[in-house]
């Protein structure tokens, strides 16, 4: 009687053999790359779904002090983007989302000096959580995984993203509105800026 294959039945050797077989088939190779990418997206999404919204905010004073001391290990009172990224990778790997980390970093850098103070750091996880959620929406539209949304992708998913039916004309107008630099593709910072403006959650100019 047939049944689902247990992951334990797929050992490393036969898995590698199957991958090798597909890779050596030039016709199958593009599909393999897409499948692997989709699998990576799926696993990352599930990891984030398990944690998004579950980061305690505001952090308890003791936890904030602990994390800040890890960041500001030299005691100069400031932290850099690289140090924030390292903290996330080592202590919150399910939130290791570079575009979201970048947007959260820019948002909390209130004086635009390129460094984060202890008081600014207090809001980091709130915004990391917020931008991870926006990334999920963005990634859901980005069919070809190039981290940009073209007009075809936008029209296809506009109804579900914005929660209302859109004509092609309305979708095209909305696309141009979000595409702040007029490059013909919506980048994540533009996508995030649009939603931040709608939700009045972030200073749009900082994105």
Image: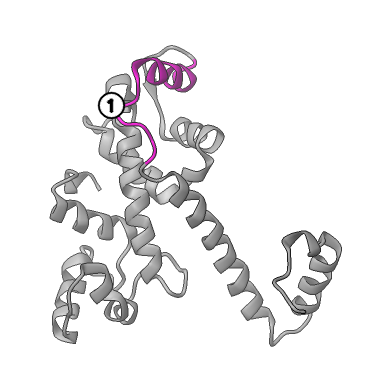
Measured as percent of width and height from the top left, residue 49 is found at 44, 51
Q: Residue at x 27, y 80 (%)?
A: 155
Q: Secondary structure at mark 1?
A: helix
Residue 178 appears in which quarter of the rendering? bottom left
**Does residue 132 belong to the magenta stretch?**
no
Q: How is the image coloured?
A: one colour
The answer to which quarter of the image holds residue 62 is top left
- The one nearer the camera, 36 or 110, is 36
Q: Is residue 55 left or right of residue 179?
A: right
Q: Is residue 89 left or right of residue 156?
A: right
Residue at 47% from the left image edge and 69% from the top image edge:
145
Q: Residue most toward the right? A: 13
Q: Nearer the viewer, residue 83 or 121?
A: 121
Q: Residue furthest front?
A: 1
Q: Can you say whether 40 is above or below 124 in the image? A: below
- Membership of 57 in magenta stretch: yes
Tag 1 residue: 120
Residue 91 percent coordinates (x, y): 53, 32
**On the picture, is 126 further left or further right than 28?**
left
Give me the residue at 28% from left, 30% from top: 113
**Residue 192, horizontal then vertical, whole percent:** 27, 55
Percent position of residue 32, x then y: 66, 75
Q: Point out the stretch of residues depicted in magenta.
A: 54-73
């Amino acid at each position: 009687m047939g049944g689902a294959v247990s992951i334990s039945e797929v050992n490393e050797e036969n898995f590698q053999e199957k991958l090798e077989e597909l890779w050596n088939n030039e016709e199958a190779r593009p599909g393999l790359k897409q499948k692997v990418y989709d699998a990576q997206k799926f696993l990352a999404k599930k990891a984030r779904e398990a944690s998004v919204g579950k980061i305690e905010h505001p952090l308890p004073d003791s936890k904030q002090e602990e994390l800040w001391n890890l960041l500001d290990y030299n005691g100069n009172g400031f932290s850099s983007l690289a140090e924030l990224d390292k903290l996330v990778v080592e202590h919150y790997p399910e939130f290791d989302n570079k575009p979201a980390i970048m947007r959260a970093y820019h948002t909390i850098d209130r004086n635009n000096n390129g460094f984060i103070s202890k008081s600014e750091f207090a809001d980091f996880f709130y915004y990391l959580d917020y931008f991870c959620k926006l990334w999920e929406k963005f990634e859901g539209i980005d069919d070809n995984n190039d981290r940009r949304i073209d007009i075809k992708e936008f029209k296809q998913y506009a109804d579900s993203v914005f929660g209302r039916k859109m004509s092609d004309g309305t979708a095209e107008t909305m696309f141009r509105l979000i595409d702040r630099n007029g490059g013909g593709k919506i980048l994540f910072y533009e996508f995030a800026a649009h939603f931040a403006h709608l939700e009045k959650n972030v200073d749009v100019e900082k994105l």
